[in-house]
Amino acid sequence: PAIVELAAVLGNEVTDAELAALGLDARLLDEIMRALAFGGYVERTEDGWRFTTSLFRESLERRGRDGGRSAGHHRRCADMLAQRYDDHAVGIAARRARHLLGAQAYEEAIGPLLVAAEFAVDESVAQAQELLDLLAGAIENVDGDTARWRAQGKLIRGSVELIRGNIDEVMAISSEVADEAEAKGWNTELGRALSQRANMLSHLGKSAEALVEYERALSVLEDEGSAELARYMVSLGVARRRANNVGGAIEACARAVEIYETLGRDRDLINARSELGCSMLGHGRYDEARDLLKKAGTDAASLGSSQAQWRALLLEGLLEILAERWEPARACFRRANAVFDAQGIRKTVVEMHEAFIKVCDGDLAEAEDTLNHALETFEQTGLRFEIPSVMTALGICAARREDWTACESLIDRASEGMSESGATSLLVAAGADATADIAHGAGQTACESKARRLAQSQWVALGHPRVVDN
């Protein structure tokens, strides 16, 4: 019956609440589903039903299409999802967009496709690309001026290309969209394009230039609504943290947290709390940072956002590195890898942190190969912000091998990299201190002095209390 077709269109796994919201006869549907369960076609779940074979579900969908009922089924599902949920709830925008496409409501599908694609960038590059392809198809089926939607899609594609390490492509996209948005008076898109370009400059180790772009972005986003401003504040916080302004980073991220709490944007709030926690690490506020990161990780898990949980665990691992608690740090990275399969640049960053833990704990066997691979990757992609961290970790390796010439050279290169970028790095500070400690134990005064100066320069710039200890 058509009632089962509608359930099949809704999804592979359907809940009683959503089926009821579609206005279906609950008694009749229950009788039919129990009969199908007896035949092995569906099975009961905790709160609904699951189709056990894709062939059966696909046959129901095909029958609906052949009978001319499919578009109507999709329309009912899309309307039900819009009534029950906000598009920013996990997974809802993608579901609603697919139903709207099935209903051939192409223009209406564009909004949720943009939201879904943006969320997917964090969770899965492949899924984000698929949604961007669907977005392009939907736009092609819409008459009239679609330039603004295309620009929004380009910015999301820029985020995908960043994960893939295609820096030149990201810069080209952000510059193209910024020029078009400025000419046409699209403040939201202009602000996002400037923020994306600023983010790239920050990654490239050009902190001063990045902050100039962020200031331009702020000037156009201040009147664009709270959610857009909060999104910007998180990015600004990251840039300020990298440019030695940890207090300003805390201020920006705290403002974002406040806005998202007011708006009830739980998913965005997770990211804002994670970045606020990371910024607090710079001032040595470890207890507050740990509370924020654990809260972010727990909330991310409850919402099913694996990437956000991964990010919170990654930062918690950094906290444990700074506290020189190697086993808890390892545990954080193991859990992070278990919840999210990081790819591209993200994977390299995780591997670098894991190798850093190993060298600090005296395990050089695999760490050096990993660090050299990371160094090669960062140099090839132009992501120079991370290079001094790798140099410092390799300096620890050289110190443990008692190759003091190589150690001093690596510390010098790390120092030059930090000076050129005008940035600060907790990992560089901790690594340089570790190198200085090893050199001190070996009586290598010159190497100890260089490493300690590098560490002190970072702790002082960060405003971290650890500088007093040294």
Image (tube, rainbow, N blue to C red):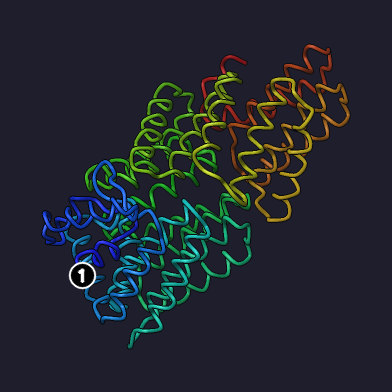
- Residue in the picture at 57% in, 65% down: 171
Say which amino acid is labelled 1.
Ala
CA neighbours of label 1 inside 10 A, class few (<14), some (14 to 19), many (20+): some
Residue 224, horizontal then vertical, whole percent: 29, 61
| Quarter containing the N terminus | bottom left
Q: Nearer the viewer, residue 84 or 421?
A: 84
Residue 270 in sight from this viewpoint = yes
| 408 relative position to 22: left or right | right
Residue 456 picture quarter: top right
Would you place residue 188 above or below residue 419 in this image? below
Q: Position of residue 128 (x, y in %)?
A: 47, 61
Write down the quadrant of residue 110 in the picture. bottom left
Residue sitting nearer the eye, 222 or 280: 280
Residue pictured at 38% horizontal, 76% vertical: 148
Q: Is residue 217 above or below residue 299?
A: below
- Say which quadrant the C terminus sits in: top right
* Residue 29 in the image: above or below residue 326: below
Closer to the camera in the image, 464 or 19: 19
Front-lying residue, 352 or 198: 352
User: Among all residues in the image, which is located at the extreme bottom?
Assistant: 143
Is disc 1 placed on a helix, strand or loop? Answer: helix
Q: Position of residue 16 (x, y in %)?
A: 19, 50
Q: Give the residue at mark 1.
A: 2
Q: How many marks?
A: 1
Q: Residue at x 85, y 23 (%)?
A: 401
Find residue 290 and report its image quarter: top left
Residue 232, how many percent across, how many down? Answer: 39, 53
